[in-house]
Structures are given as C-alpha cells and as structure tokens.
Amino acid sequence: MAGSSSWSRALMQISPYTFASIGIAISIGVSVLGAAWGIYITGSSLIGAAIKAPRITSKNLISVIFCEAVAIYGVIVAIILQTKLESVPDSQIYAPESLRAGYAIFASGIIVGFANLVCGLCVGIIGSSCALSDAQNSTLFVKILVIEIFGSALGLFGVIVGIIMSSQATWPAKTA
C-alpha cells in the first residue's frame, strides 16, 4: 500500500461536508476579519483627522459603512452556501458528485473570504486617505469617495465569482 500516505488519498478520506463547512466558515470569518481591519484603519485616521477638522466626522462615516458592507457580503454568501448543503446517503458520501459539491463550496468560501479580506483592506486604506485629505481640503472628498466605491467593487467581484463557483455544487440524488 504505497499510496496510503499520499496527500490525495488523505484528502479523499475527508468528508465533503467537512470541506463545505470549512468553506462556509472561511467565507464569513475572513470577510468579517477584512471588515474589522478596514474599520480599524479608517476609524483611527478618522478620529485623528477629526481633531484638526471636526466637520469631517459625519461625512467620512461612509467609509466605515463601506467596510461594514464587506462583512455583510460574507454573511450573504455564507447563507447562500449553507443552502447548497444537502443530505446524502452514507453509500454516496464519497461519490465523485459529492466530492465535487464539497470542493465547490469550499473553493467558493475561500474565494469570497479572501476577496473580502483584500476589499476590506483596500476600502480601509482609501477611507483613511479620504479622511486625512478631507481634513486638509474639503473639495477632495467626493473625488476620493469615487475611488473608494471602485475599491468596494472588489468585494462584489468576489461574491459574484463565489456564487458562480457554488453553482457547481450538486449533490447526488437520493435513492428511495
């Protein structure tokens, strides 16, 4: 049994439900991490810049809202992926169709989670620069806000790719 210690054999022995569940957890967990990181970056700059120009506080809260949207993207995709899970008889749990469904949900969760992590960082950094530049020159706010919207689109791209990938998750039909 020379192949018994190979990675492919080990991965084939892990339940597709385990892969799917880990993908769902990564989708929501890493998305929330990206949102928190972005809020941290934006919020610290916003508070610091508001000392010099208190007028920017309410205007620049939009950057925090954009960061929070990243977490909502992860929650939405996690709910969509959770609805893709179906029960399969024990005899078909390692069928190729079950493995493909588990891997598709896993890959979808990874893509959404890490796209939202990068999106949260991007929106946080842009929001930070928006707060700092708005404190110096209020005419720059709208110009940088447009760039922040483009940065926020990265998360939407991840959601779209994740939904497309999860459409491959079809479990074997139950036999009566």
Image: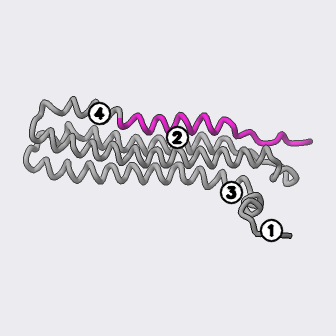
Residue 136, compared with residue 91, is above or below; it is above
- Check disc 4 and report the residue beneath it: 147
Where residue 36 sits in the image (x, y, percent)?
37, 53
Gap between marks 1 and 3 measured at Cα:
20 Å
Q: Nearer the viewer, mark 2 or mark 1?
A: 1
- Check disc 2 and report the residue beneath it: 76
Gap between marks 4 and 1 measured at Cα:
52 Å
Residue type at the position of mark 4 = Ile
Q: Nearer the viewer, mark 4 or mark 1?
A: 1
Q: Tell whether 110 sits left or right of 5.
A: left
Mark earlier in primary sequence (4, 1): 1
Q: Nearer the viewer, mark 1 or mark 3?
A: 1
Mark earlier in primary sequence (4, 2): 2
Element type where label 2 sits in the image: helix
- Check disc 3 and report the residue beneath it: 18
Gap between marks 2 and 3 measured at Cα:
20 Å
Dot 4: few (<14), some (14–19), or many (≥20) neighbours within 10 Å? some
Gap between marks 3 and 4 measured at Cα:
39 Å
- The one nearer the camera, 143 or 76, is 143
